[in-house]
Amino acid sequence: MSMFPSLDDDEISLPKLTPIDARFFVPRFIDKPQDPIMDSLKLKASKLRTGDHFRLELLPKELSIIYEQNMSPRTKDSIWSDALKSNVLGRSSQIHSWDSLRSNVPKPASSSGFLSEQDAVVFAAAHHHALPILHDTHSIVQYVSLGDILKNMKLTALGFSSLLHEWDPANEQFLDIGLNKGMRKRFIIEGKDEIISADFISRFIRIGTSLRRLETLIAYLRSKSSIGPTLYAFAHTISTCIGQIRNSLASGPPSEEQLSTNHLALTFVFMYYGQHEEILTALSVLCKRQSETKDYESIPASPQALLSLIYDHLHDHIERQSSHLIIATLAFILTRTSTEYFIEVSRSIGFGHSEGVRDAIGVPKEYPAFFPPELTSALPIAQKSLRLLRAAQPNHPLLQNSKRSLDIRWFWTTDEIMAAVNSTETPKDIAVTEKTGDELSSTSTAYLPELLEFRIYDLEPGRLIGQSCFDAAYTSAPTLALDNFIKTFPPSLPPIAPTLYHLTSLVVKPLLLHATTLSNTLLSLFLTLPPPLDIHSHLRLMRSYMLLMSPAFRTRLSAALFSDSGNFDADVKSSEVLSLRRGSQKTDLRRKTWAVGLAPALLDRATWPPMDTDLSFFLRTVILDSFEVNVNDETLRSRVEEIENRLGFAVRDLPTKSGQNAWLNPLHIEALDFLYMDYKPPQPLDVIITPDILAKYQRIFSFLLRILRVQHAIHAVFRMSNSSIPFVFGTLASSRKMLLHFRFIAQSFVTNLVEYVYDTAIAGNLDPFLERLQRPGNFHSGTKGHKSDYSDVFSLAEAHADVMNAILTACLLRTGQKVSGGALREALEVVLDFAVLVGDLYRGRLEEYQAAEVLESLYIQFRQKMANLIKVLNGTVDQNPCLSSPTYGIARSKEISWGIEALSHLLIRLDFGEWWSSAGKTQ
């Protein structure tokens, strides 16, 4: 047996291998005569039948029906009959042969290789085959012909319900018709795919939705009872824009003729409605109706915010270089909406034809954001100036000339802008006339623009019979105005006003000029009032009495309220005599501490402050007597009675809480804070002399009473220390020496302070201001710290307030000067305590050894307070580099000391040799 068994072919059957044939072969000719022409015709006919069958298989059932409908019915006529009916090959030659008339003749090749540029049916079939429509249980696919979709979409774009969509007022959107809840319908235009169809249909739905939402907004605004003229004008203007857009949509494609002939390009329709969608989108964004849901933002109710909103949208579209239609429409809305507001603003300052309405119901207090800052600041001043000018001079020429001025309005054309730049008047806008305009223009009489409507009375009787106010010529006037506005609107602003901001400045320029002229006129009138109302005389009067700058009044007031006598018994006897004259109950003053510096007559009762009757008794003739002393001219004596009625003393209510009741103790420096001077300015001058300014005068008056009290107290100390009987500190030489030194430095401090307050703080600030009032022509050459130009009475009042603030600053009385002001008050309190101590020692109420210890304590306190005051003043002066020079005050002693600059003068007066500074370092 062999290792390898023999294989028998019969036992194992293997499959046969596939034969390897040639890649090409030449078929053997049949052994019969060949007819190549007939064979070629049969082959092409078989291919044509196969192609037609394959094409129908590709189409969906719906499209195959459309295709079969479009196929011309096959007839059994001969090819020769077909040749007589139509030119199959599209040739100009009418010669046909049998081979060119067969049905399978090759057609001309396509001009494009792109599938989307083939026949619509071919492209739809290819798209359906490549991207078949997915089955969705919540949607229904409906195929619509082009004519039906255009006819229904035009209704939808106009805002009406159609056979395909209906308007849902609850959600304010278009819904598909005939669907259950949760279902939706997908429309497919014949020959188009689903994406193109949805994009085409959505544009019409968006246009119709925007129209209906804007109409709903207009109806809502008009239903409100009090929306104001500006918001009503806005609603009317939006309604005009909607009407113009709807008219354009109604006259646009597709028309009935285009639908019947089917000669309409879908791209043309899509682009035509695109421009309307852009303008409606801009209007929807402006009216805040662009969101998909019904939760819209509210439109601003105030005219200022509404106009600012329109202006901002117009500015944004100009910056983005939007289409001419959008910019012109927004400019039209801004022009018409702002008309009533401009009239209201003009009326508030007496400008334009609306000046006759003297009392405006609502004077604007806020202004649109596009108003220039100089106008927003000038308008409130002009409104106040107008009321004052009407009260002062109702027949002033400025009030009469303003009636002939044109109303403020927006202008956009180049001619109007150039006329505004050149300050020439432009013809007023004439409303778009109806078809009667040509007939009315035939009248030969020339009318002013405001009387143009009276032309109708010049026509022949019966000229306009048969015309109705409901004619299209009348009802379409607003839309015609919008059309003309868009036609005349320039493509861009001229170079003289290249931006909307520059154009706004030109529009409101007459308003700004009138406002400034009105304010300047009132100012000149105030400065030229006759002597009884002369502002300069009133300010001089307040300077003399409320600031104690009159020596005669200061002397009489000091005699009534203060005393620098060193003889306490003599003062008590005089007080007793006055008490007997008044019939008041006498109080033994010898048992109480002597309030040095105060008149003893004020202390004859057991209470402080003195009663009103006592004050009126002491102060009843102080003002008039001092005034008569200053009057040397007999012609001025007639003003005495008026001054008495306007100027007087009064008592204020002060707090009595702990820590705030120092004014209840006559020994304190605040003892006379309850007393102040009241001034009642005449009615025209209360604009310049305001209550706030009067309060500043009264604060300075209280401060002056304090330093006068301390001044009289230190004078009394001088008399008591120089008296030989009794001799103060006669047994204690060191205490006597300290007393004299203390008296010297205290008197030096008080004297320098009083001179500084009167000469530098008050006169250095107020006198230059009064001199400027006497020279109105020099207002433009102002000095440092003062207004360089008083454009109106209110800026003059502001300058007056600034002067008083400067005086308060120089006297360390401002709220922000609590540290320095407190240091000055504490130093004055120590001086007053020193005077009270000397008074008690002089009267024998204290022994010398008892007073010596108190004197030393007060002396140390005074040195500390003065060192602290000088330190604070040095710190204040060092903060201003121009004041840090040690010779600054001397070099400018004759110049104006404005506000904080005056503190350098005070520092030099109190610490000229830097004695207090060195003493503070030693301590």
Image (cartoon, rainbow, N blue to C red):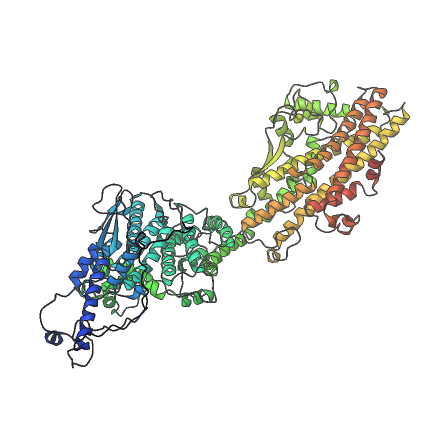
**Residue 179 picture location, percent across and down:** 22, 44
Q: Please state, as top left, top right, bottom left or bottom right, where the C terminus lies in the image.
A: top right
- Which residue occupies the foreground of this view, 103 or 545? 103
Answer above or below: position of 824 versus 277. Answer: above
Question: What residue appears at the point 20 percent right and 75 percent down from the top-left corner?
Answer: 89
From the viewer's side, name the closer residue of 593 and 113: 113
Q: Nearer the viewer, residue 781 or 107?
A: 107
x and y percentages locating residue 777 in the rendered image: 60, 58
Identify which residue is drawn at 14% across, 66% down. Answer: 72
Residue 516 at x, y = what percent? Answer: 51, 55
**Quadrant location of residue 617?**
top right
User: Which is more toward the observer, 873 or 172?
Assistant: 172
Q: Is residue 853 above or below residue 890?
A: above
Q: Quadrant of residue 577?
A: top right
Residue 504 seen anywhere in this rendered image of the structure: yes
Q: Is residue 170 left or right of residue 619?
A: left
